[in-house]
């Protein structure tokens, strides 16, 4: 009897150990109550202390309910989505905005980010679906932009923080050193399995894109949001209470002043093949390139400008000689010939001395390259 009891106990122990190893390898998302964080929201409303942020854990903010890993926004945390999305090694993204009660953003032009009040938090999750070997979702990082102070001559008041997700997917921890991290990941997207070494950017790399220095002065760089522009938000998405135009939704919940203009020059989804090719290409270039290629941006030293509202084809690079010589690329965009266009050569490489964008990807965005190729090859006329 004792021997049977011993063998049964040993069997239970072995099975338990096997399950533990299997679950650990799967990096599953648990609903076990012991992992639920007591968030600020549970105590009666989100109210990050601007003098105390950044908090050590993403869950400390209370932006998400029912476990931070579920990414269900708490009351007052509003999802949003730009018409076209920046390419980041095929990562999926979720974006949210939270503002202190009684405050709202204001309009500052179709292609400028909204002017946000003190205390605003912009939240961006990066994750993959169909991740090997268990075909699961894996959240990699969450980036926060927090407006901690009012704008001054030398500061916008915005501060950027990165939270790196734990392997068990139960929470994300602050990258307090600011060096970023590499995350190898194998996933299936559009029916194709890909393996990449995803780069969570260092603090200095984040600022490279999220900065502007319109005065070109020493210490004149300011950290700013780049995605939530009226031109990017002027279309409907699905909310839990139905479809609604995002700008109107922001107004209805008190997050945006209602004095926005009736007609906004709006970007489109570059993947929408029912739209004109030129508008699709311009939308793609705007979201992927315009934040650096603008006055005061990181690539201000070139004359090319990729903002969606720009109607000057030469300023878009059409028949413009490149600043730096590349063999067989006499123009940034050579009418009718993508094979002789600098922009395609830079998009279609991972050579860090040549690639554009400079950061944010480790692989070629094949669909984006195909779009720009088709747009260029369909141009009539010739460059001189």
Image: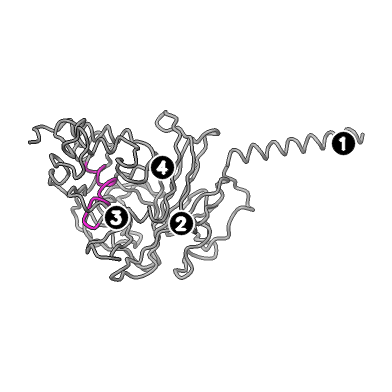
At 21% from the left and 58% from the top, the residue drawn is 109
Label 2, secondary structure: give it. loop
How many numbered circles are shown? 4
Q: Image point 34% across, 38% down: which residue?
A: 351
Residue topped by disc 1: 5
Residue at image location 27% in from the left, 65% down from the top: 218
The answer to whether the residues at label 1 and label 4 have Cβ atoms under 8 Å apart is no
Disc on res. 178: 2
Residue 137 percent across, percent down from the top left: 50, 40
Above or below for 235 versus 273:
below
Foreground mark, 2 or 4, reads: 2
Q: Which residues are magenta?
A: 282-296
The residue under label 3 is 248
- The picture quadrant where one finds residue 6 is top right
Q: Is residue 91 left or right of residue 327?
A: right
- Mark sitting earlier along the chain (3/4): 4
User: Is 293 within the magenta?
Assistant: yes
The image position of residue 198, as x and y in percent, is 44, 42
Foreground pick, 328 / 123: 328
């Amino acid at each position: 009897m004792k021997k049977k009891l011993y063998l049964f106990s040993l069997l239970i122990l072995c099975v338990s150990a096997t399950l533990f190893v299997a679950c650990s390898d799967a990096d599953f998302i648990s609903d076990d109550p012991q992992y639920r964080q007591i968030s600020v929201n549970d105590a009666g409303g989100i109210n990050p202390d601007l003098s105390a942020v950044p908090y050590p854990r993403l869950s400390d903010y209370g932006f998400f309910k029912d476990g931070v890993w579920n990414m269900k926004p708490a009351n007052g945390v509003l999802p949003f989505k730009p018409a076209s999305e920046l390419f980041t090694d095929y990562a999926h993204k979720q974006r949210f905005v939270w503002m202190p009660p009684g405050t709202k953003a204001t309009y500052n032009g179709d292609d400028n980010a909204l002017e946000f009040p003190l205390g605003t938090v912009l939240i961006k999750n990066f994750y993959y679906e169909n991740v090997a070997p268990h075909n699961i979702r894996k959240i990699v990082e969450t980036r926060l932009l927090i407006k901690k102070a009012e704008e001054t001559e030398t500061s916008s008041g915005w501060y950027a923080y990165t939270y790196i997700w734990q392997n068990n997917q139960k929470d994300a921890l602050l990258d307090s050193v600011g060096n970023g991290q590499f995350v190898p990941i194998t996933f299936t997207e559009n029916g194709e399995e890909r393996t990449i070494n995803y780069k969570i950017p260092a603090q200095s790399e984040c600022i490279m894109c999220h900065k502007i220095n319109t005065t070109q002065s020493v210490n004149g760089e300011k950290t700013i949001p780049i995605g939530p522009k009226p031109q990017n938000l002027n279309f409907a998405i699905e909310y839990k209470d139905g479809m609604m135009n995002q700008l109107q939704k922001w107004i209805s919940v008190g997050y945006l002043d209602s004095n926005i203009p009736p007609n906004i020059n709006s970007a489109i989804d570059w993947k929408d093949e029912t739209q004109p090719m030129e508008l699709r290409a311009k939308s793609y270039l705007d979201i992927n390139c315009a934040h650096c290629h603008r006055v005061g941006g990181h690539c201000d030293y070139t004359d090319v400008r990729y903002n969606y509202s720009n109607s000057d084809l030469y300023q878009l690079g059409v028949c413009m000689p490149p600043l730096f010589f590349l063999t067989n690329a006499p123009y940034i965009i050579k009418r009718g010939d993508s094979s002789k266009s600098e922009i395609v050569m830079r998009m279609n490489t991972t050579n860090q001395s040549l690639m554009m964008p400079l950061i944010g990807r480790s692989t070629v965005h094949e669909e984006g390259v195909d779009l720009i190729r088709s747009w260029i090859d369909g141009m009539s006329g010739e460059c001189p």
